[in-house]
């Protein structure tokens, strides 16, 4: 493992030249679809809009397509990678980057509080992007922004508004902690190996009034509601119905025949508070 992505073994000018003999085959189990187009890489990093000296953490640096650009940033640059082979390679190639060998799915994100104004970026492994974002977004308390590449279909769910077909538990959960914006679509041909579907970049800006304290009740509420998204609210919440839920309906002008997909993040958050209070009382 010597030359890696800096060497153009193919003579293919303009491509992110990865000397593939330096690496094992991409691991499908780790969602390893590597970016091979430097223009897209530059556009992705520019979309993060890092300020001078901002700390930045890349999730899944892989063979360094984005890391190489981030390494030129004048603030602290860190990278979190699960694949031990790639961890070793990134450390050798980018000595100034702080490399964390860890699994983003069970990483203690609270530990980043010592880095206020942190920005996160990553071409996320598609097989675990949704659960990873679910965990990260509810812990973005001290972060400045996040910019992730995910499958286009997931990007549409992340950014969907209530009432849209793509709106679901993930959209409602994310919408309580951050404003998610669809930035641009990325076609399959800029990856090696190529995925079968389009990808997209999504930017997340933490809300000024995030739902930190309501997290557990909100998670319970969106999960039970969207497991039965075609049913009416009154039917789904039959065993949780109470005068408080009735009062919530009256306050928000919500009919009990409404379906979960018609309730926006803020309405779901206030419903979660009502259900959370009742659950606390029943637990004694
Ligand atoms: N950033 C590189 C690029 O754009 O070419 C690689 C992106 S590749 C889609 C996803 C990367 O995330 C791989 O390097 C993979 O090993 C890493 N990865 C997969 N699962 C992970 C996990 N649970 N935690 C941290 N990194 C993970």
Image: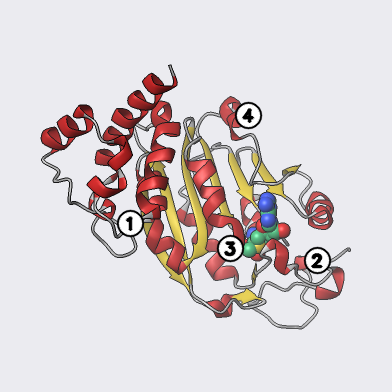
The residue under label 3 is 126
Element assignment for label 2: helix
Mark 2 close to ligand 1, CB under 8 Å = no
The residue under label 2 is 4
Would you place residue 37 above or below residue 255 in this image?
below
- What numbered label is drawn on residue 229? 1
Q: CA distance from mark 3 to mark 1?
A: 24 Å
Q: CA distance from mark 4 to mark 2?
A: 31 Å
Mark 4 close to ligand 1, CB under 8 Å = no
Indicate which disc, 4 or 2, sits on the residue closer to the N terminus.
2
Element assignment for label 1: loop
Binning the other alpha carbons within 10 Å of mark 1 as few (below 14), some (14 to 19) or many (20 upward) gives some
Regarding residue 73, the answer to whether it shows in the image is no
In this rendering, the label closer to the viewer, 4 or 3 = 3
- For this orientation, the residue located farthest to the top is 284
Mark 3 close to ligand 1, CB under 8 Å = yes
Binning the other alpha carbons within 10 Å of mark 4 as few (below 14), some (14 to 19) or many (20 upward) gives few
Q: As rendered, which of 278 and 161 lies closer to the eye?
A: 278
Regarding residue 203, the answer to whether it shows in the image is yes
Binning the other alpha carbons within 10 Å of mark 2 as few (below 14), some (14 to 19) or many (20 upward) gives many
Q: CA distance from mark 1 to mark 4?
A: 35 Å
When asked about the image quadrant of residue 173, the answer is top left
Binning the other alpha carbons within 10 Å of mark 3 as few (below 14), some (14 to 19) or many (20 upward) gives many
The residue under label 4 is 111
In this rendering, the label closer to the viewer, 3 or 1 = 1
- For this orientation, the residue located farthest to the front is 239
Q: As rendered, which of 235 and 138 lies closer to the eye?
A: 235
Indicate which disc, 2 or 3, sits on the residue closer to the N terminus.
2
- For this orientation, the residue located farthest to the bottom is 11
Indicate which disc, 2 or 1, sits on the residue closer to the N terminus.
2
């Amino acid at each position: 493992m010597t030359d890696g992505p800096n060497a153009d073994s193919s003579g293919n000018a303009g491509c992110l030249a990865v000397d593939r003999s330096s690496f094992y085959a991409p691991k499908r189990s780790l969602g390893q679809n590597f970016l091979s187009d430097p223009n897209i890489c530059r556009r992705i990093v520019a979309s993060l809009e890092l300020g001078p000296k901002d700390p930045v953490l890349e999730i899944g640096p892989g063979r360094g397509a984005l890391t190489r650009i981030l390494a030129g940033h004048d603030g602290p640059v860190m990278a979190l990678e699960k694949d031990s082979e790639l961890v070793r390679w990134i450390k050798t190639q980018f000595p100034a980057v702080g490399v964390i060998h860890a699994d983003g799915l069970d990483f203690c994100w609270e530990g980043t509080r010592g880095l206020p104004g942190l920005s996160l970026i990553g071409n996320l492994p598609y097989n675990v992007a949704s659960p990873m974002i679910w965990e990260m977004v509810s812990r973005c308390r001290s972060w400045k922004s996040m910019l992730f590449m995910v499958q286009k279909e997931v990007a549409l769910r992340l950014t969907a508004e209530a009432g849209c077909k793509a709106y679901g538990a993930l959209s409602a959960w994310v919408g309580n902690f951050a404003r998610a914006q669809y930035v641009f679509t990325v076609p399959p041909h800029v990856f090696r190996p190529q995925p079968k579907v389009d990808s997209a970049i999504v930017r997340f800006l933490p809300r000024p009034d995030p739902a930190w304290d309501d997290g557990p009740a909100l998670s319970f509420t969106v999960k039970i509601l969207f497991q039965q998204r075609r049913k009416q609210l009154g039917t789904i919440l039959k065993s949780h119905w109470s005068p408080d839920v009735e009062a919530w309906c009256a306050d928000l002008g919500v009919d009990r025949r409404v379906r979960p997909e018609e309730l926006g993040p803020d309405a779901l958050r206030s419903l979660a508070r009502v259900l959370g209070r009742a659950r606390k009382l029943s637990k004694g």
